[in-house]
Image (cartoon, rainbow, N blue to C red):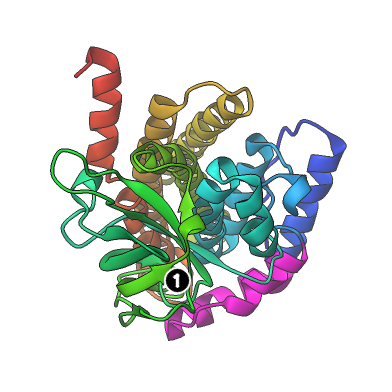
Amino acid sequence: MATTVERVLPDEESADLLELVRDVCDGELIPKAAEYEREERFPREVFTTLGRSGLLTLSHDVAWGGGGVKQEVYLQVIEELSAAWVTVGMGTSVHALGTHALAKYGDEAQKEKWLRDSLSGERLNAYCLSELEAGSDAAALKTMATPNADGWLLKGSKAWITHGGVADNYTVAARTGEGDDPGFAMFWVPADLPGVSFGEPEKKMGMRGSHTAQVHFDNVQLPADALLGVRGQGMKMALDALNYGRLAIAACATGVAQAAYEVAATYARERMAFGKRIGEFQGVHFILADMATSIAAARNLYLAGARRLDLGLPVISDAAMAKLFATDAAMQITTDAVQVLGGAGYTEDFPVERYMREVKVLQILEGTNQIQRTVIGRAIVGR
């Protein structure tokens, strides 16, 4: 079942939206999650269903086909999706991340050309920032876009790309210059252009239904208008997108933690040992109390950041704090859920072992949690 969280939402329309999400989770996500993850199958048809239900593009402007939903509500949708199947919750966030630069920095002509189609629900987007030698150090990226008579020639490779090989469009960070003037920029790259190719999906510990792969650009000819915003604005655009992405990862982590907690709490209420329910033992109900407290704290942290975004306020530290706390908490909570279930928790008879494997990557992507501490620390003491 979808989660039993009692949510405080801004209006009745938002409550109805969350009910729709829970129906989709119960009908389309939860029945498929374990099988697809075991078989490493990418659930493209699930994303199509989300798109046709209007759930894939909630955070974008209504004028271009989005839902126009506040971040406060959108991130709770991401949490619910992630509680049902984190591959889908994170994938929905990645789709929004891959559309962010076009939606926020693109001009009207670019939006008319690409955005409406991108928000149709039939197409999937990805975000290409990381490289094999430029992960947390994004400024070290080497992918190059060189101007020519027809627009731009794109050459390089990206690594650890969620939806790599299955997305229809890629937002790509690249240099446009050398030395002291790298001219970082963002480009809109359809997957079917000549010269775009993909590596094999990575073999991962968890979230195996989500395809992660290298993306290669071998002298890909882009039109002049593939440049989003202006040359030199790319790093600002990337960091701006990461603020949204980090809050979404916090919501993903909170969702998985909530799902693990509910399995553990149900098991503790039903499992008998020494003549009583194991949840009555202090050693177990203290664990459950800590789980519930950490989940509430994580949820309130990401919602605080979301509300600041909705007000147009800076969220760099807020997003870093939410991502840091929520993902670390989820790692502890899923580990504790396995412990509460004992031997049963270590088997595939229950989903908690999968949850524990899945949340590990949330401590790594969108900037490792060590990077989040650096971001927070610099905000406190300055560089």
Residue 375 lies, in percent from the top left, at 28, 29
Instruction: Decide whether residue 239 is among the magenta residues.
Output: no
Q: Residue furthest right?
A: 12
Would you name the residue on which mark 1 appears?
Answer: 210
Determine whether, in the image, residue 135 is placed left or right of residue 6.
Answer: left
Instruction: Tell me how many marks there are.
Output: 1
Residue 371 lies, in percent from the top left, at 24, 38
- Quarter where residue 316 is shown: top left
Determine whether, in the image, residue 294 is placed left or right of residue 143.
Answer: right
Residue 1 lies, in percent from the top left, at 68, 63
Could you classify mark 1 by the number of other residues whose Cα lies within 10 Å: few (under 14), some (14-19), or many (20 or more)?
many
Residue 8 lies, in percent from the top left, at 72, 32
**Secondary structure character of the magenta stretch overall:** helix
Q: In front here: 152 or 194?
A: 152
Q: Residue at 39% of width from left, 71% of height from top?
A: 221
Determine whether, in the image, residue 6 is placed left or right of residue 219.
Answer: right
Q: Which residues are magenta?
A: 26-53
Q: Residue furthest top?
A: 381
Q: Residue at 41% of width from left, 72% of height from top?
A: 164
Secondary structure state at the residue bearing disc 1: loop
State whether residue 77 is above or below residue 239. below
- Quarter where residue 338 is shown: bottom left
Q: Is residue 162 visible?
A: yes
| Screen quadrant of the C terminus | top left
State whether residue 371 is above or below residue 122. above
Q: Residue furthest left?
A: 179
Instruction: Decide whether residue 49 is among the magenta residues.
Output: yes
Q: Residue furthest bottom?
A: 39
Q: Residue at 80% of width from left, 42% of height from top?
A: 15
Q: In front here: 32 or 172?
A: 172
Q: In front here: 29 or 181?
A: 181
